[in-house]
Amino acid sequence: MIVILKKNPDKNQLESLKTWLRDKGLDIHESVGMSQTILGLIGDTTGIDINLLNALDIVEDVKRVQEPYKKCNRKFHPEDTVITVGNTQVGGGNLTLIAGPCAVESEEQICTVAKLVKQSGATMLRGGAFKPRTSPYSFQGLREEGIRLLEIAKEETGLPIVTEIMDASQLPCFKNVDVIQVGARNMQNFELLKALGKTDKPILLKRGLANTYQEFLMSAEYIMAGGNEKVILCERGVRTYETYTRNTLDIALVPSMKILSHLPVIIDPSHAAGRYALVPSISCAAVAAGADGLIIEVHNDPEHALSDGPQSLKPQVFDRLAKKLYAIHEVMKNTEDVL
């Protein structure tokens, strides 16, 4: 249920209303926007009399929310959420470019790539330290050492670092990580999501290979219900009958999430395509569709990469692509009023 308040509600009446609602066993999510204030009521609202609420002087309207997700629901929070990471922001009309190798392989490799992608306009550095692989015989990542190398690259470039967690037991290793990534395989690892809900770090949550929009948002809800509202949604493609691409990018997710949720939405074109030649076009389409950013795999020697070389861009290709992406983003911003 949401309670829409009239403009400039009386403070004493508002506090009395919130006290009464809390006495009913409800949690209140208060969203203060430019033109109105909304109280999102979380809990069992079946005993709340809508007519009684509507009769209050400070109440404009009362609506029941049918969707099971509340905190990430745009009805509860009409304004876009903007998440600050270091000196950059995700959402709010900004274009976030997260770039780097699929896996951290050495200090020289990660520092070289970090410097190059920063020169090209990347705002964050990605790199896998803990690697979930389909085969147990594939490179599993450098683990704690990989995070240490990411920290060195951060010191040299100033770029915030993004890396994936696989289990809640690994959280102590992530104390200096700026954004914790939850991979597609862990999207419904609810114990991990609960643990991340108790942290204060931004969480980049990837959609699972065969999950619906509602299931995706319910996973975000797990994190937010724990108290951490810094969630970034990431579409990385879903599994279909097509075999030419690694996955099938659901570009419709971007405008859909803009309707359903207030959280920032980014696209992972690398995992969607699985082929480096397709990444630039998919990236451009994502920005044109309104994505708040991209997470792109870039490797200085993709032919010899230990993980996902075929889908990684060379730094010079990323440089050209970044310029194009910023140009498209600027065009889209300037045509918003027209559209």
Image (spheres, rainbow, N blue to C red):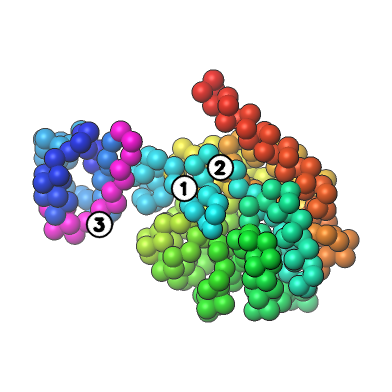
Residue 298 visible, this angle:
no
Q: Quadrant of residue 135?
A: bottom right
Q: Which quadrant: the C terminus?
A: top right
User: In terms of sequence position, does the residue under pointer 1 or pointer 3 come before the other?
Assistant: 3
State the image coordinates of residue 156 (x, y, percent, origin top left).
69, 66
- From the viewer's perspective, is the residue at label 3 or at label 2 nearer? 2
Name which of mark 1 and mark 2 comes first in the sequence. 1
Residue 155 screen position, x and y as percent: 65, 68
- Which residue is labeled 1 in the image? 82
Mark linked to residue 94:
2
Mark 2 burial class by Cα count in 10 Å: few <14, some 14-19, many 20+: some
Q: Is residue 64 left or right of residue 227?
A: left
Question: Badge 3 local density, few (<14 within 10 Å), some, or many (20+)?
Answer: some
Helix or strand or loop: what does disc 2 sit on? loop
Q: Quadrant of the N terminus?
A: top left
Does the image show residue 265?
A: yes
Mark 3 or mark 2: whose residue is earlier in sequence: 3
Viewer-closest of 251 and 210 = 251
